[in-house]
Image: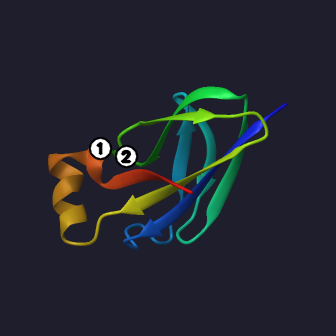
Amino acid sequence: MAATIRVRRIGSPIGTFRKLTVLVDGEKAGTVGFGDEASIAVEPGAHWVAVRMDWVRSRGLAVMCGDRMTTNIDAIGLWFPASLVMSFVWPNRVFRLEVRP
């Protein structure tokens, strides 16, 4: 059977007209636009999820996906001007991932 990882993009409109790349276990698994969701089918078990846009990205998030379960994750962008500063200082913290119920 399969499990699902659902990524919702919320928060700052940084890169509003661009899509985030969703990475699962280091591989491109899909894209998600601002205010949208992406559903990605995965095998049950442990997975590492991250998002990126060019050189800015999130830190990785480890999730455990159960059989026929959906794991919901919010990709939250920092607000300007913090997003601009972080793009150059800590580019892996421009987006934050959080598991939601």
Identify the image's colour scheme: rainbow, by chain, secondary structure or one colour. Answer: rainbow
Callout 2: few (<14), some (14-19), or many (20+) C-alpha neighbours within 10 Å?
many
Q: Quadrant of residue 85?
A: bottom left
Q: Label 2 amino acid?
A: Ser
Disc 2 and disc 1 in contact, CB within 8 angstroms: yes
Q: What element does badge 1 sit on?
A: helix
Q: Label 1 amino acid?
A: Asn
The residue shown at (74%, 38%) is: 3
Point out which mark residue 53 bears: none
Q: Relative to the observer, which residue lies in front, 9 or 91?
A: 9
When the figure is inspected, residue 75 is found, relative to residue 68, above or below; the finding is below
Callout 1: few (<14), some (14-19), or many (20+) C-alpha neighbours within 10 Å?
some
Q: Which residue position is annotated with label 2?
A: 58
Which residue is outermost to the right?
1
**Could you tell whether 84 is left or right of 48 in the image?**
left
Q: Quadrant of the N terminus?
A: top right
Q: What element does badge 2 sit on?
A: loop
- Looking at the image, tell me whether mark 2 or mark 1 is earlier in sequence order: 2
The residue shown at (19%, 71%) is: 81
When the figure is inspected, residue 38 is found, relative to residue 49, above or below; the finding is below
Q: Relative to the observer, which residue lies in front, 46 or 26?
A: 46
The residue shown at (64%, 26%) is: 45
Q: Which residue position is annotated with label 1?
A: 92
